[in-house]
Amino acid sequence: MKKTLAVAAALTMTTALALTGCGGGGETKPESSGTSKGSAAADAGKITLWVDTNRQPAIAKIAEKFKQDIGVTVELVVKDNSKIVDDFTTQAPSGNGPDAIILAHDNVGRLVQNGVIEAIELGAVASKFQPVTVKAFTLDGKVYGLPYATENLALVRNTDLVKQAPKTWDEAVELGKASGAAYPILVGGDDSTKASPYNLYAFQQSFGAPVFSLAADGSYDPTKIAMGGQPGADFANWVSAQGKAGILRLSIDNDVAISEFTAGKSPYIVTGPWNLEKIKTAGIKYAIDPIPAAGPQAAAPFVGVQGMAMSAYSKNKIATQKFLAEYMSQESVQMDLFNALHRPPALTSAFEKAKSDADVAGFGAVGAKGVPMPNVPAMNGVWNDWGNALTEIVEQKTANPAETWQKMVDAQQAKLK
């Protein structure tokens, strides 16, 4: 990356112009929401980022380098991760928000809808990232974040109970039963009253029933629910069969599932990297495998991508853009964040280094074949009815699972009109 004195000088000059309303590379400021941003005191030599405790040390290192190279201070404000997006949505229009925030990519749709984040230009840098990570932050052809880490579900196998990875769901169940363990395989629900669309999505995908239709460029079409038809019916009937056989149970939620797995009561659990510490502490010897397909297609879990997005109300967009696209994309930064979070890096070269860790390699390989969690606003209205339909089917409360499923799909589609 070229960081010449000429670039630094140009950045300083254009940043100052942008802040006084005289430049900014042709960018137009968002409409004011009752607060005059032009009258607010602005520091041309500073940008503010909202981060959490876990990421702050890694980002602080590159922030210091940015100040040395460019002369712009990066102020890191530590916030509660669970509140960052909501607080940002509320405060950004008033001019009290930061220039950028950390966030999960599935927040992009509603933040764009609310007009509080702005697209960034990655240029050639985009090709250096794993494709799924850039795709996750893309909406309507524009990229709204700089990705730095991924996470997804995979199949974690107790290698003392089963020696080989299963190729299909049926094989997993067969090997699980043969192991003599209490549960052939564990797939937790959201809680003890509701099945988990997230945990079951990889299997749903294997029947060819994605949540939304895909546009020609591979992005989600949020106007068309695609979970219905024969693929959806086949999935619903499969869910019902697993519930009837006692393999899927509402009494097995996520907490119970990991507890039973770490107690050695099942050879398999569908889970994410967030549970690895518990598995290690329990002394379980494990391997990370692809999720086995239940239908005719490959199983593909949702992939979540962590990144940083720029505020549409940033007072220093040029510096913020540069920090995100050129500095947060550096391999050393992505590796620092990996060491802090132990999640597969989004940058391909960093991932190649990090995958010397078997856990990262395992989850990363599964995630590379996964699909981004939809980042469209319509997704927020889908989860509840989707989970309710799955719950009813698992509990055997419907005589016609396919019909129950299609009613849910039709109701969801009606909401989108």
Image (cartoon, grey):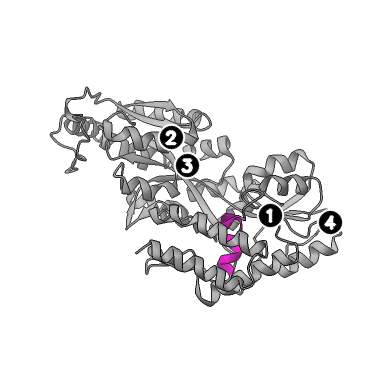
| Main secondary structure type of the part rendered in magenta | helix
Residue 339, image quadrant: top right
Spot occupied by residue 181 in the image (x, y as percentages of width and height): 84, 56
Q: Is residue 116 left or right of residue 348?
A: left
- Label 1 sits on a secondary structure element that is loop
Question: Tag 4: Cα neighbours inside 10 Å, few (<14), some, or many (≥20)?
Answer: some
Residue at the spot x=41%, y=27% of the render?
Answer: 76
The one nearer the camera, 399 or 203, is 399
> Per the image, is 199 magenta?
yes
Give yes or no for contact between labels 1 and 2 (Cβ–Cβ under 8 Å): no
* Residues drawn in magenta: 196-206
- Label 4 sits on a secondary structure element that is loop
- Label 2 sits on a secondary structure element that is helix
The reply to whether residue 143 is in sight is yes
The reply to whether residue 356 is in sight is no
* Amino acid carrying mark 4 in the image: Ala
Q: Which residue is mark 4?
A: 181
Q: Which residue is mark 1?
A: 250
Q: CA distance from mark 2 to mark 3?
A: 25 Å
Q: Which residue is mark 3?
A: 331
Label whose residue precedes the other's in the sequence (1 or 2): 2
Q: Is residue 412 left or right of residue 283?
A: left
Q: Which residue is mark 2?
A: 84
Label whose residue precedes the other's in the sequence (4 or 3): 4
